[in-house]
Amino acid sequence: MRIFIITMDDPVQTNNFIKYIIDNKKDEIIGLAVPNGDRLKIGKNKSKILYILTLLLIMGLPDFLKNSFITMSFKIKKNLSKHGLCNNPSITYYAQQFGIPVWKIKTPNSKSFMKELSSLKPDVIINQSQSIIKKELLEIPKIGVINRHNALLPKNRGRLTPFWVLYKEEKETGVSIHFVTEELDAGDIIVQKRFPITRKDNFNSVVKKNYEIAPIAMLEALAKLENGEEDFIKNENSFATYNTIPTIKEAWQYRRKRIMSFLGQKKV
């Protein structure tokens, strides 16, 4: 099967997920592209500073600083690698070590990139970028474009799903590998894996659990597609819930609830 990957170059979680796919499918991967943008890409007319403050409240200071350090170290190493002072930590460099062609692009929806991509005749495209994939690109692969979503679709479509399952005090969550369609997170589900949410879980532990099962789920999904299996789970719109980026107020409500819960446990 001919697999193409479109992904952000994110050192906190995504790169390890993509590395796992490369390690296990390197002979089938025909290319990897990294569009501009990162996890802080939130759209026009929205404050990036306010979003960062929201993430600080959601993560808590220790984990926020840890992730910030990982990201800053990653960027510094990428710059140093240009002068031969260290190895390049980027996902593009990792892919190149296996002879996988790479593209650094502005957007996957550009006509020039789609023309090149179409000439490669991919069977499947894995999209882990922050880009909204347009119809013209969706029609390129023989089987389809697929995505990893950190929630149990059709519930919790949209952004920052580990936060929302905690905010809404849901009892379980998981990972869905699904087809990408023009409608947000609405394509049929190929593989879905679940795990319970415990009283000890926080945003960071849920994200960690998501990414522990995501690579396994993705490989299972690729195997099903390669075998021609079509026992997909319907992603019913009638059961769908939608999430946007949390407001600073919602992030504070979540943080306050966690503080009160911690103080209550200390008293006991």
Image (tube, rainbow, N blue to C red):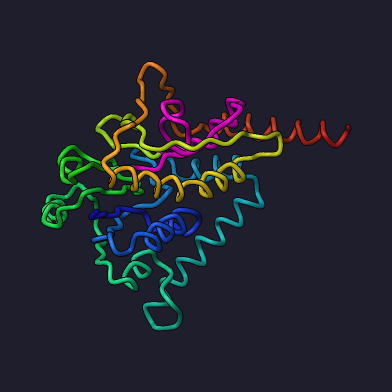
Image quadrant containing the C terminus: top right
Q: Position of residue 124 (x, y in %)?
A: 25, 48
Say whether residue 140 is magenta.
Answer: no
The residue positioned 28% from the left and 60% from the top of the image is: 29
Q: Residue furthest bottom?
A: 84
Q: Position of residue 190 (x, y in %)?
A: 36, 36
Say whether residue 152 is magenta.
Answer: yes
Q: Quadrant of residue 53?
A: top right
Q: Which region of the structure is painted magenta?
A: 147-176
Q: Position of residue 258 (x, y in %)?
A: 70, 34
**Image side of residue 25 versus residue 61, left or right:** left
Q: Is residue 140 above or below residue 135?
A: below
Q: Is residue 205 above or below residue 192?
A: below
- 90 and 31: which is toward the camera: 31
Q: Quadrant of residue 96?
A: bottom left
Q: Residue furthest right?
A: 268
The residue positioned 46% from the left and 72% from the top of the image is: 77
How many discs appear? 0
- 122 and 45: which is toward the camera: 122
The residue positioned 40% from the left and 38% from the top of the image is: 191
**Image side of residue 76 versus residue 61, left or right:** left
Q: Quadrant of residue 48?
A: top left
- 52 and 259: which is toward the camera: 259
Q: Position of residue 173 (x, y in %)?
A: 54, 33
**Image side of residue 264 versus residue 31, left or right:** right
**Image side of residue 234 versus residue 125, left or right:** right
Q: Is residue 214 above or below residue 96?
A: above
The residue positioned 53% from the left and 37% from the top of the image is: 162
